[in-house]
Image: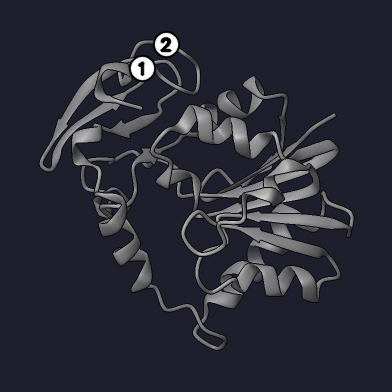
Amino acid sequence: MNSSSSTECPCCKETTIPLRLDNGTHHRCPACGFIRKDPSLFLSPDAERARYDLHRNAPGDGYDRVLETFLANAVGPFAAVGDALDFGCGKSGRLLELLRRHGFSATGYDPFYAPDSTVLERSYGLVTATEVVEHFRTPEASWRLLCGRVAEGGTLAVSTRMIPADFEHWWYRRDETHLCFYTERSLAAIAGRFGLRVVSTDSVGYMTFHRD
């Protein structure tokens, strides 16, 4: 998405308004609360990859506990064990390992680390996206792709930090690879556009959807 299309909210399609902060212009939707950095602030793909290469998620570092909490709250009560896709699985593939440990037949996709796009040619009973949707350069197209992988009767579980009252001083927005920021309303709106309804949220860091 280029800067000329930044005035339309990808979640609810209302017109956004400019929000000028210390690191440059953002675009905020007054209807659903979605906020997006202007494309002029985006890193190059090579610089983005270099940032991800610095991530160190290994067994025993506490990250597994975060993922287990996500599985217990956002996945376990809603998704039957079966086939699963971890969309944006990252370099470590930690969630893939945990899904398999929980009995799922899990496949990963990541544009940098697991770029086999043939896994996106089918749908899955469970799709997970942990700390992924805030990185979308083209949110509408990326959400369409993500939601389109959810089979009829399937579940999509998403984790991302939701916008707090003090967005200006929020640490999460200062990550240069974080481009999109959501409220409960904006997450529900964009998933709803692609046929999914909300079944659960903690109002802070995760939301679970279902395709009827």
Q: Please state if 198 lies on the left or on the right of 166 as rendered.
A: right
**What's the residue at 60%, 47% (across, down)?**
158
Quarter containing the N terminus: top left
Q: How many marks?
A: 2
Secondary structure beneath label 1: loop
Q: In which quarter of the image is residue 134?
A: top left
Which residue has dot 1 on it?
Answer: 30
Q: Mark 2: which secondary structure?
A: loop
In the image, which disc is placed on residue 81?
none
Percent of width and height locating residue 121: 73, 42
Identify the amino acid type marked 1: Pro
Q: Give whichever of discs 1 and 2 has the lower sequence position.
A: 2
Spatial CA distance of label 1 from label 2 is: 8 Å
Q: Is residue 58 left or right of residue 94?
A: left
Residue 4 image point, x, y percent:
26, 17
Q: Choose between 197 and 139: the one closer to the eye.
A: 139
Q: In this view, does 5 lie above or below 85?
A: above
Question: Which label lies toward us, 1 or 2?
Answer: 2
Q: Nearer the viewer, residue 159 or 97?
A: 97
Percent x, y of residue 42: 25, 43
Mark 2, residue position: 14
Q: Which amino acid does label 2 sit on?
A: Glu
Which residue lies at the image location 40% right of the left edge and 26% below the top edge? 33
Residue appearing at x 83%, y 64% in the figure? 105
Tell me: 170 left or right of 1: left
The residue furthest left is 22
Nearer-the-camera pick, 212 or 125: 125
x 20%, y 40%: residue: 41
In contact (CB < 8 Å): disc 1 and disc 2? yes
